[in-house]
Amino acid sequence: MILAVLFANSEGNILVERFNGVPAEERLHWRSFLVKLGADNLKGVKNEELLVASHKSVYIVYTVLGDVSVYVVGKDEYDELALAEVIFVITSAVKDVCGKLPTERLFLDKYGRICLTLDAIIWKGYLENTDKDRIRRLVRLKPPTEF
């Protein structure tokens, strides 16, 4: 299962997060842990260069995409190899939505579409769609959500 997908800016502020099967009381721990992991290891890393870690019997694959850090956490069948595929689909889709590597400003400008795209890719903790054209169609078909 894919437990979490998080996007953070260079200061460690969470921009987008999706948790699946993670109790609310554990989410703060995961946020803090992932941001610290990125602060310690992502300096000087090239765009889309994958880093891997494990913590409490789960796997973490993370990378930098423009000004944004991307973290994917999984367990069971979502080991580091499967998570590498997941993060590739996510980063490709975000670049597609933004039209290029995202700056923090561009990421926030495209926030709604990025959230819809992320929801089209991952469904209830599982990688649902990997085809770019299908993801684009699904995002266009989804009605706007009320906030």
Image (spheres, rainbow, N blue to C red):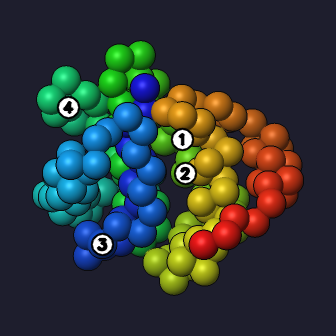
Among numbered discs 2 and 4, the one appearing first in the sequence? 4
Amino acid type indicated by mark 4: Ser
Amino acid type indicated by mark 2: Thr
Residue at image location 68% in from the left, 45% down from the top: 120
Amino acid type indicated by mark 3: Asn
Residue 88's disc is 1
Q: Nearer the viewer, mark 2 or mark 3?
A: 3
Marks 2/3 in contact by CB < 8 Å: the verdict is no
Please, is residue 90 above or below residue 32 in the view?
above
Secondary element under disc 3, as helix, strand or loop, is loop
Location of residue 54 (image quadrant): top left
Among numbered discs 2 and 3, the one appearing first in the sequence? 3
Secondary element under disc 4, as helix, strand or loop, is strand
Between 4 and 49, the one nearer to me in the picture: 4
Label 3, on which residue? 13
Q: Nearer the viewer, mark 3 or mark 1?
A: 3
How far apart are the alpha carbons under marks 3 and 1?
22 Å
Marks 2/1 in contact by CB < 8 Å: the verdict is yes
Q: Local crowd at mark 4 within 10 Å, few (<14), some, or many (≥20)?
A: some
